[in-house]
């Protein structure tokens, strides 16, 4: 059963509160990007493939807004692999989405079914499906660290839940998606979250 949900009601999709970020100067954003890139350079990578994704993430950082840069820096601090970070931000970063699609397009056979929940917004629903699949595949493919390592870390789980919910909310608002089955969408998100934190 479809529920009419305007952007003002999308907060119910969020598991945490996200405060509106203050306007940041270009200098402070540039400093934040530089700091995140420096942290990324310090993280030891054992495989050349991982280093390639580090470089791609470092380039994409320049295209992100301040709040997203802050989230990426948090993930880098936690040593989350760059491909997993790219997957997590792929819903709101076309560049990150292209990297993930190139990496996984031959194996995108996961079971996330969002399209039936948004019959009037099939294109947007398909992009949400890809986002969830990218996260699932990147996490499963990681040979260094899987998100399940942090399943008992309340700070990490809370931040990840809050940030992904905010990305989804921003995506829905930007694309003017207002009619969908909210309860089923929340269940789908809960399912994906449970899977990525599974042992």
Image (cartoon, rainbow, N blue to C red):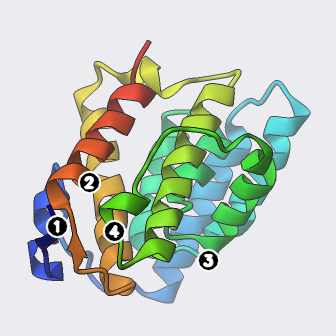
**Mark 2 or mark 1: which comes first in sequence?**
1
The answer to whether the residues at label 2 and label 3 have Cβ atoms under 8 Å apart is: no
Q: Which residue is mark 3?
A: 63
Neighbours of disc 1 within 10 Å: few (<14), some (14-19), many (20+):
few
Q: Which residue is mark 2?
A: 185
**Quadrant showing the N terminus:** bottom left
Residue at 58% x, 67% y: name it: 33
Mark 2 and mark 1: Cα distance apart in space: 11 Å
How many numbered circles does the render carry? 4
**Mark 1 or mark 3: which comes first in sequence?**
1
Element type at mark 2: helix
Instruction: Give whichever of 13, 144 is nearer the camera.
Output: 13
Residue at 57% x, 70% y: name it: 93
Residue 22 can be seen, yes or no: yes
**Mark 2 or mark 3: which comes first in sequence?**
3
Q: Which residue is mark 4?
A: 118
The answer to whether the residues at label 2 and label 1 have Cβ atoms under 8 Å apart is: no
Neighbours of disc 4 within 10 Å: few (<14), some (14-19), many (20+):
many
Mark 1 and mark 3: Cα distance apart in space: 35 Å
Instruction: Give whichever of 46, 185 is nearer the camera.
Output: 185
Mark 2 and mark 3: Cα distance apart in space: 29 Å
* Above or below: residue 144 compared with residue 56: above
Q: Which mark is residue 2?
A: 1
Q: Nearer the viewer, mark 2 or mark 3?
A: 2
Residue 53 can be seen, yes or no: no
Could you tell me residue 141's position as x and y percent? 69, 28
């Amino acid at each position: 059963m479809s529920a009419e949900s305007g952007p003002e009601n999308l907060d119910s999709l969020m598991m945490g509160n996200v405060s509106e970020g203050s306007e940041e100067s270009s200098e402070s954003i540039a400093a934040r990007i530089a700091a995140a890139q420096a942290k990324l350079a310090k993280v030891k990578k054992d495989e050349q493939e991982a280093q390639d994704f580090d470089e791609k993430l470092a380039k994409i950082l320049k295209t992100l807004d301040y709040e997203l840069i802050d989230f990426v820096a948090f993930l880098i601090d936690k040593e989350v692999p760059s491909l997993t970070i790219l997957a997590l931000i792929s819903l709101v970063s076309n560049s990150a989405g292209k990297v993930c699609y190139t990496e996984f397009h031959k194996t995108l056979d996961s079971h996330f079914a969002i399209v039936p929940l948004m019959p009037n917004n099939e294109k947007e629903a398909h992009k949400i499906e890809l986002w969830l699949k990218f996260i699932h595949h990147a996490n499963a493919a990681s040979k260094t660290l899987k998100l399940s390592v942090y399943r008992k870390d309340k700070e990490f789980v809370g931040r990840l839940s809050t940030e992904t919910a905010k990305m989804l909310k921003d995506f829905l608002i930007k694309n003017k998606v207002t009619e969908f089955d909210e309860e089923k969408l929340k269940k789908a998100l809960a399912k994906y979250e449970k899977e990525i934190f599974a042992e």
